[in-house]
């Protein structure tokens, strides 16, 4: 995360039914969404690699390839959500969610929202849009991305989060009594992810101006503690079941809080994946890192990557210039060949000048 001029992007998800709803297997669940972003109920499968495109469409952005998925209706051309939050939970077959519209996920491959982030940065360069990402690594958790200085207060290392858990207003104070051993490494990782969810909401509630910016906010949260707990305790263990209940309740509250902070103009989505088909390799960097060069990733001073809006801008400028050139030629030709004998403004002004002379 970088300088103080940056600000944050979030997305909540809409729940369309109030009945008890569990996400079985790999699933994509919409927890909260505004009225102008409509998801139809049905069992239409969505490919895991197209989830970033689906997030882009909910924000009103165009995608490289058309997404022929009937679950999302065409939204309003004049309104778009001000935030989108996509949460990925690994290592769980189902979450006991009280509400939400779920769809099966096919081909559960790792994905990132980097393409959506790049679109936001290119469309809102003056607003310093930010992507805040939470992802698992071997040492614990880390945050990456550019963000407002407010979010520098967010604990990002496992040591910082452990220190945060020892404070009076930590997530441990609001959790119900459970059988989880708080000295266990995997349990501490689980609590650390819950703590980050709570702190994000707390910071947004404290600095509400971040949610009123013109550019949309984007959150990408990848939670892997349940996967570690399943390996340590087993899927049928009491610890795993309690952790699943706690996480489901926390995610529902997170979605509701996000939806409220953004004045019902946010989308919150949840992806539950038992196991990805292949690992996600991500290059880590500091949370406070900022881009210092105009074209990062091009150490040889190469040209920028192709922008898919280039063709549109090129055609607008090209045809506008052609019309202007043809108009100038036509006007010049008619003025040059005009008969001065006509009773025109040019004739009268010229004739008057001659008489005076």
Image (cartoon, rainbow, N blue to C red):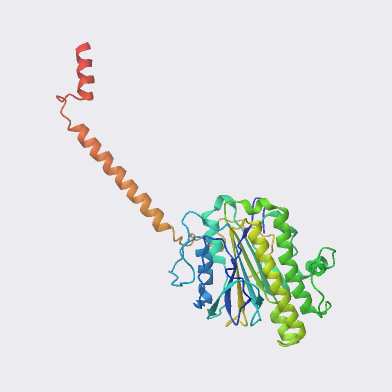
Position of residue 292 in the picture relative to residue 236 (left or right): left
Quadrant (top left, top right, bottom left, bottom right) of the C terminus: top left
* Quarter holding residue 217: bottom right
Quadrant (top left, top right, bottom left, bottom right) of the N terminus: bottom right
Residue 350: x %, y % from top left = 21, 20
Position of residue 104 in the picture relative to residue 205 (left or right): left
* Quarter holding residue 105: bottom right
Most extreme residue toward the top, as rendered? 356
Position of residue 25 in the picture relative to residue 340 (left or right): right
Instruction: Answer whether residue 24 is visible to the viewer in this image.
Output: yes
- Determine the residue positioned at 73% across, 70% down: 194
The residue closer to the viewer here, 215 or 99, is: 99
- Determine the residue positioned at 69% across, 57% down: 204
Residue 299: x %, y % from top left = 56, 63
Instruction: Answer whether residue 156 is visible to the viewer in this image.
Output: no
Report the label total: 0
Rendered position, 297 above or below 138: above
Residue 317: x %, y % from top left = 37, 49
Position of residue 335 in the picture relative to residue 80 (left or right): left
The residue closer to the viewer here, 347 or 285, is: 347
- Determine the residue positioned at 39% across, 58% down: 311
Residue 354: x %, y % from top left = 20, 15
């Amino acid at each position: 995360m970088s300088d103080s001029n940056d600000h944050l992007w979030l997305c909540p998800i809409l729940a369309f039914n109030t009945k008890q709803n569990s996400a079985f297997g790999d699933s994509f669940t919409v927890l909260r969404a505004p009225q102008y972003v409509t998801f139809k109920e049905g069992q239409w499968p969505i490919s895991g690699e197209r989830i970033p495109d689906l997030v882009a469409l909910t924000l009103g952005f165009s995608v490289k390839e058309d997404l022929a998925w009937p679950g999302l209706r065409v939204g309003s051309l004049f309104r778009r959500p001000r935030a989108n939050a996509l949460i990925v939970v690994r290592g769980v077959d189902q979450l006991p969610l009280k509400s939400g519209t779920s769809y099966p996920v096919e081909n559960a491959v790792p994905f990132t929202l980097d393409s959506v982030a790049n679109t936001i940065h290119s469309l809102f360069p003056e607003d310093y849009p930010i992507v805040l990402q939470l992802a698992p690594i071997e040492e614990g958790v880390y945050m990456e991305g550019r963000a407002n200085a407010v979010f520098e207060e967010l604990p990002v290392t496992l040591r910082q989060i452990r220190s945060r858990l020892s404070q009076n207003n930590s997530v441990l104070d609001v959790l119900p009594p459970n059988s989880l051993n708080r000295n266990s490494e995997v349990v501490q990782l689980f609590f650390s992810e819950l703590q980050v969810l709570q702190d994000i909401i707390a910071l947004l509630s404290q600095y509400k101006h971040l949610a009123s910016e013109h550019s949309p906010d984007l959150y990408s949260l990848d939670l892997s503690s349940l996967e570690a707990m399943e390996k340590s305790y087993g899927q049928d263990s009491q610890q795993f079941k309690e952790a699943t209940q706690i996480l489901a309740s926390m995610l529902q509250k997170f979605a509701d809080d996000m939806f409220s902070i953004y004045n019902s103009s946010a989308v919150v989505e949840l992806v539950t994946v038992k196991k990805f088909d292949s690992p996600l390799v991500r290059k880590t960097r500091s949370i406070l890192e900022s881009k210092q060069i105009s074209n990062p990733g091009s150490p040889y001073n190469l040209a920028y990557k192709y922008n898919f809006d280039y063709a549109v801008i090129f055609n607008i400028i090209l045809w506008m210039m052609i019309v202007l050139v043809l108009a100038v030629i036509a006007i010049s030709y008619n003025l040059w060949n005009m008969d001065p004998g006509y009773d025109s403004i040019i004739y009268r002004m010229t004739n008057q000048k001659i008489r005076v002379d």
